[in-house]
Image: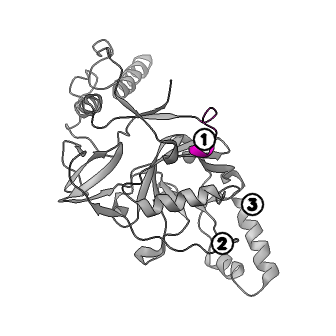
Amino acid sequence: MKRALALTALAVAACTSGPASLAEAPVATAAPAWRPVDAENLVLMELPTGTVAVELFPEAAPAHVARLRELLAEGFYDGEFFYRVIEGHVAQAGREFAMSSKAWQNVPFEAERAVSAEGFAPLGNADLFAPEAGHRSGFTVGRDGEQEWLLNCPGALGMARDEAPDTGNTEIYFPLQPRRYLDRNYTIFGRVIAGMEHLHRLPRVDPFTDEEAAALFGEDEPLAYQMAQYRRSKNEYNIITSAKLAASIPEGERPSYEVMDTASADWAALKESKRDYSGIAAFIAPPVNMLDICSLPVPARKAGD
């Protein structure tokens, strides 16, 4: 039994360290290439268990990024909840019921755009959902000719909407697992770069039932109020204490982050180290030399770490 446990531990260590064994693992001799995250694109969301840091990608979806910046500036999400947290699917946040302050106009659908391949770093193998997959500026993207879109990998930031494409408004979501069938159907405009574990810790909450909806939106105002309070009580551990742009914090007090440059040799080497596990002595049947686009998030770190 002790030997079996030791072999299991060896296999786990091997999976996290790459294809070389622990004794053979190369020692890095140079710092990797990192780029700073612009404070105007850094969202800091405080949850009961800690901070979730999100980088926005305005080049891909400028209207969505502009809307989120506007919402954050007025404290829209402060005191609101992740009111829809589905196991193996998504965590959705915002205001579960009618807007309480002012109506927000819908934003245009920006799920994909035409952009040249310059700056695109191919994954290096076939993808199940896109003719070509890879990275741009640290974000996972798919391509088909000149068309490019961000992917619904875990931690992607997307805008929820109604059935019509141009109905995104204020409600945001984060995939908890790969949800690639959503690609090109919902606008992705950012990704979690730190604190994904806090999203995974959110208690699961189902959408309200037909009976709850009838009470919430019926003509019986006291019953609607009671149901709204009940729904809020179910979400008490999913509260968003605050959500703000790092740029709104004085420069000397704000945290700063760096992301590995996906145009760098460091990123190319990291990808290859996770593609080929043939050197793991404990593996009886080494995996095929393929890399899933969602299985290797681009590394990020707090500046100075």
Q: At x 54% / y 40%, what residue is drawn?
A: 195
User: Which region shows up in magenta?
Assistant: 247-254
Visible residue check, residue 250: yes
Amino acid type indicated by mark 3: Ser
Image spot of residue 170 (x, y percent): 56, 66
Q: Earlier in the sequence, mark 1 or mark 2?
A: 1
> Position of 15 compared to 242: left or right?
left
Extreme-front residue of the structure: 251
- Residue 150 located left or right of residue 221: left
Which residue, given by chain and number where applicable, does mark 1 sit on? 51
Q: Which one is closest to the eye, mark 2 or mark 3?
A: 2
- Give the CA distance from mark 2 to mark 3: 14 Å
Amino acid under label 1? Answer: Thr
Residue hosting label 2: 97
Q: Which residue is drawn at 43% across and 22% down?
A: 5
Q: Which mark is residue 233?
A: 3
